[in-house]
Image (cartoon, rainbow, N blue to C red):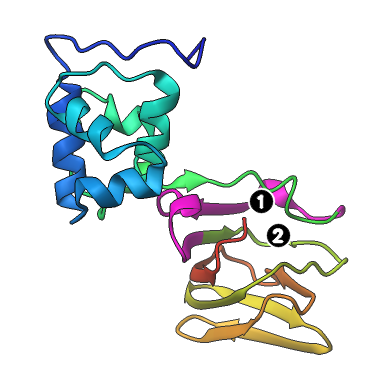
Amino acid sequence: MGDPQTRVQDTKDIDVGSRLRAARVARGMSQRELARKSGVTNGMISQIEQNQSSPSVSSIKRILDAIPLSMAEFFDENFDASPKMFFKASELREINLTRMLPLGSTDAEISLRQVGDTSRHAIQMLYERYAPGADTGAELYSHNGEEAGIVVSGSIEITVGNLKKTVEAGGAYRFDSRIPHRFRNVGKVDCVIVSACTPPTF
């Protein structure tokens, strides 16, 4: 956004004050609470909401981070003050697996699609698809947290530590993600899983 002191200018199409007030109220936050969480003064919040002050980009970002709300969402022409709770299939975010999985994985045949922005929440929900032969790698991987999932279709071979189990459609799993684990589709059709991980890891 350039110089962090660059000012956010109101336009005929974007009423920064009204948007900020609507977003704050939708989340049940007082001006004082928002000021405390964002590290700005209560007076600044009040002035911005009344369009009596044009905040710097850095200031408005600190305020939006405390809501939380991204700059892109706040300035979107289809702005909705309410927290986003519903997502179309096209709005799920594809996770880049190259940094997550160990060498030897067939990540091109694995798709993990995430619900929303997990950096702002305490749980991560994923829609997972493993093509036949897809494998997270012979080298087991681990991460902080606990995960669970339900196999929607197909089947998946899951290794957790020294245990190995094939979970069929309708079956489920749950384990401590700090234990090294591996997912492998040894079947002939795609395996689809809906899973959750807390805290968000990927």
Give residue 132's position: percent from left, percent from top: 66, 62
State which quadrant residue 54 falls in.
Answer: top left
Q: CA distance from mark 2 to mark 1?
A: 5 Å
Q: Is residue 87 visible?
A: no
Residue that appears at 80% across and 75% down: 180
| Residue 17 pos. (x, y %) | 16, 27
Task: Look at the picture and state if 185 lies above or below 58.
Answer: below
Q: Which residues are magenta?
A: 103-127
Side of 174 relative to 72 (left or right): right
- Looking at the rendered structure, the number of numbered marks drawn on it comes to 2
Sequence-wise, the earlier of marks 2 and 1 is 1
Left or right: 142 in relation to 188: right
Q: Secondary structure at mark 1?
A: helix
Amino acid identity at mark 2: Ala
User: Which residue has dot 1 on it?
Assistant: 109
Q: Are marks 2 and 1 in contact (CB under 8 Å)?
A: yes
Residue nearest the viewer, comparing 159 with 154: 159
- The answer to whether residue 114 is magenta is yes
Q: How dense is the environment of label 2, judged by Cα within 10 Å: few (below 14), some, or many (20 and up)?
A: many
The stretch drawn in magenta includes residue 35:
no
Q: Position of residue 5 (x, y in %)?
A: 46, 14
Q: Residues within 10 Å of mark 1 (few under 14, many from 20)?
A: some
Secondary element type, mark 2: loop
Q: Which mark is residue 134?
A: 2
Q: Position of residue 149 (x, y in %)?
A: 51, 76
Q: Is residue 89 above or below residue 70?
A: below
Left or right placement of residue 147 versus residue 186 in this view: left
Quarter of the figure with residue 200? bottom right
The front one of 75 and 183 is 75
Is residue 62 visible in this depiction of the protein? yes
Q: Residue at x 36, y 28 (%)?
A: 60
